[in-house]
Amino acid sequence: MTLRIDISGPPSERLRFAASPLAELTAMLHVLAEPGHHPQLAGWAGDVWAGLRPELAERLREAEFLWRSSQADFLIPGRPRLTLAEELDDVDRIDDETYVTAALVTTCGSNRVHFATRSPLADVTARERALDLAQARGARQEAFAERLLADPAVVRARLRHTLEQCAEAFFDAAWTGAAVRLATDLRLKNDLLKRQGIGAALASVSGAVTLAPDGDCIIVDKLQDKATAAHGTGVTFIPSVFGSPHLVAVHTPGWQPVVQYPVAEPSPSEPVSLETVTLRLEALAHPVRLRLLRTLARGPHTTRELAHAWELSPPEVSRHLAALRRAGLLTARRQGRYVRYTLNLPDLTALGADLLAAVLR
C-alpha cells in the first residue's frame, strides 16, 4: 500500500521544505478531535478543551470531520505562507466547487474517490451520494453537508472565523513554541537536501518515505495504493510538532502534492507479554484485516463503508471484523440503524509504538 509521487522534473523544483501555520493548526485540531491518537498530548488537549468558550467548542465539533479522520486538502497548503491569515486568504481564493468537494470527501469517510470529475454543487447524482454518505457518518456530518451544499459562502465564512478564533484561544501560544522546533527541523532538512541530495533529505523525514531507485519517484507508505505527479509544482514537505505519528499526504488530482510529517518519531513503548502479542498478531496476520485496521484507526466505520472503501463484499468484511473483535481490538456501537466499529487504540498501543505509528500513518 503506497502513494507514488512522480517528481521527474527539473531537480531544483522537485522538493521544498517549509513550515505552515494552517497545517499545524489542523494538526492541533486533529489532536483535539482524536486525543487517543496522541497520548503524549492528552494533557494539552484536556487543558485546551477546558479553556474553550462553549461557542467555539461547539463550532469545532460541528466541523471536526474536516480534520478528524483525514484532513481537507485545503487545510494543508502546497505553498505555505508566513502567517495563518495569509494562508486563510489563499483558501478564500479557492472556487466553491473545489472547496466543497474537498470538504465533503473528508465528511463522507475515508474513501477519497466519491464524485468523479463533478462536484456535488454541479451534479445531482454526486449531491445525493454526498448526502447519503454524510448521513451514514452521523447527524453532525449530515447537517454540515446540507448547510455546505445549500450555501457554501456562509459555511466558508463561518469556518474561517472559527479558525481565527482558534488562533486567539490556543493556537498562537502553541505556535510560539512549535515554531522553534519546526525552524530547527527545516534547517536540517534543507541542509541535507543541499549537501547530500533528495535521498538523504527524504530518509530524514520518515522511514515511510523513500526515493525510488530511478530517482524520479517518491514512495510513501500510506493507506491505499495511489499515484500522483508533481510536474511543474514540486512536492512540499511540511514538518509538524503536533502531527506525530501521522504522515499526511495531499494527492488528489488537481492539487499540489504535499506531505506533512512529524518532527520526531514516537518513543518506543514498554514491551508487553509474548502471549498478548501472539494472540493479537494472529488476528492481524491477514492482509485484508490490516487494511481494515488502518481505515478504522482514522475513525469509526460501518461494515458498508469498509466494504465500499476496499471493494469487498459486506459478508467478507464482517468475517474479518469478527476476527479482530475476538482479539479485543475492536468495539461495536449501534447508533440508530448503523453499527460502527471503533479501533481500541490502547490495546493496539500495547503491541508497540512501531505498529501504532504504522496504522496511524
Image (cartoon, helix red, strand yellow):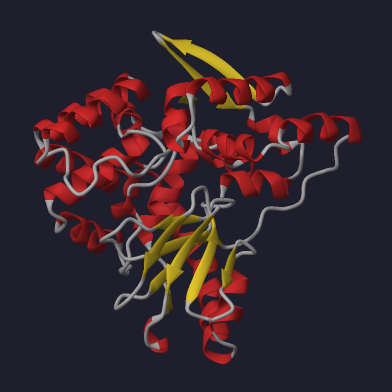
Residue at the right extreme? 274
Towards the viewer: 292 or 34: 292
Q: Quadrant of residue 249?
A: bottom left
Q: Position of residue 303 (x, y in %)?
A: 48, 22
- Between 191 and 73, the one nearer to me in the picture: 73
Residue 311 percent coordinates (x, y): 45, 35
Q: Position of residue 360 (x, y in %)?
A: 57, 45
Instruction: Please state which of residues 230 and 289 is positioned toward the viewer in this rendering.
Output: 289
Q: Name the foreground residue: 72 vs 253.
A: 253
Would residue 210 be found to the left or right of residue 7 on screen?
right
Instruction: Please identify the quarter of the rendering in which residue 284 is found.
Output: top right
- In the image, what residue occupies the spot 38% across and 64% down? 228
Is residue 152 among what the camera can see? yes
User: Which residue is at 29% across, 61% downward?
Assistant: 255
Which residue: 61% across, 61% down? 208
Q: Please, is residue 113 above or below residue 57 in the view?
A: below
Where residue 79 sits: x, y (%)? 30, 69
Q: Is residue 238 visible?
A: no
Compared to 110, does 190 lie above or below? below
Q: Is residue 166 left or right of residue 227?
A: left
Q: Is residue 342 left or right of residue 96?
A: right
Q: Number of callouts in the render?
A: 0
Specify the farthest residue to the bottom. 195
Taking the image as shown, residue 343 lies to the left or right of residue 349, namely: left
